[in-house]
Amino acid sequence: MAFHTTVHTLQVILGWLAKMAAIWFAISVISITLILFAVHAWSLLLRLKVKMDEFDRTMPLPLFDRRRKKHPKFNLRLTRRQFSRTEGEMFEKLDHAIDYLIDTYDLRKFSGIRNELLPDEFIAAQRLLQCRAEMLKEYTPLPSLSYLLKRRLAYLMNRRQTWV
């Protein structure tokens, strides 16, 4: 009788281990499949972006990204622009200088005060922000990925209609 209970207990333990191994294997297979799908989708989107850039060379890039219409308090830092490495470093240093002035002198508390009562540091930060905005005007924002997808789908739909 003792041998029978030991065998039964061993069968139960092995059954649980087999179920756990099957679940572990299924999770591994699913995660690897999702990773491969994500990598494939990412490469397709990158190729789509390249094709859209090639297609749009005849058309100027949009002056404003579509996100500006959706969000009234649009932040220019969220807009993608194409800079060279030195230009990017320059803008990064300028942003650090502005952040340093604002954080060091706690300039956020002066935002509602009249111009006559503003400290010199606040005026300097305002001038740096104005210079940054003027420099960013020279670089056209790049379109967002959703905008490129919409343009590509519109192009494909128009192309399909001309075939029919």
Image (tube, rainbow, N blue to C red):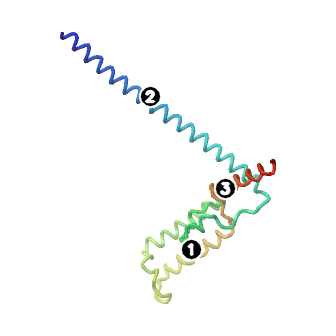
Q: Whole-Å distance between the Cαs marked 3 and 1? A: 33 Å
**Residue indicated by mark 2:** 25
| Whole-percent x, y for residue 41 in the image | 61, 43
Taking depth in this image into account, of 111 and 117 the one nearest to the observer is 111
Question: Does residue 140 lie above or below 150 as drawn?
Answer: below
Task: Say whether disc 2 or disc 1 marks the residue closer to the N-terminus.
Answer: 2
Q: Quick one: SS at disc 2?
A: helix
Q: Residue at x 18, y 9 (%)?
A: 1
Alpha carbons under labels 2 and 1: distance apart: 55 Å
Q: Residues within 10 Å of mark 1 (few under 14, many from 20)?
A: some
**Residue sticking out furthest to the bottom:** 116
Element marked by disc 1: helix
N-terminal-most mark, 3 or 1 = 1
- The residue tagged 3 is 150
Q: Residues within 10 Å of mark 3 (few under 14, many from 20)?
A: few
Q: Amino acid at mark 1?
A: Leu
Q: Gap between marks 2 and 3, in whole Å?
A: 39 Å
Determine whether the residue tagged by mark 3 lies in a helix, strand or loop. helix
Q: Amino acid at mark 3?
A: Lys
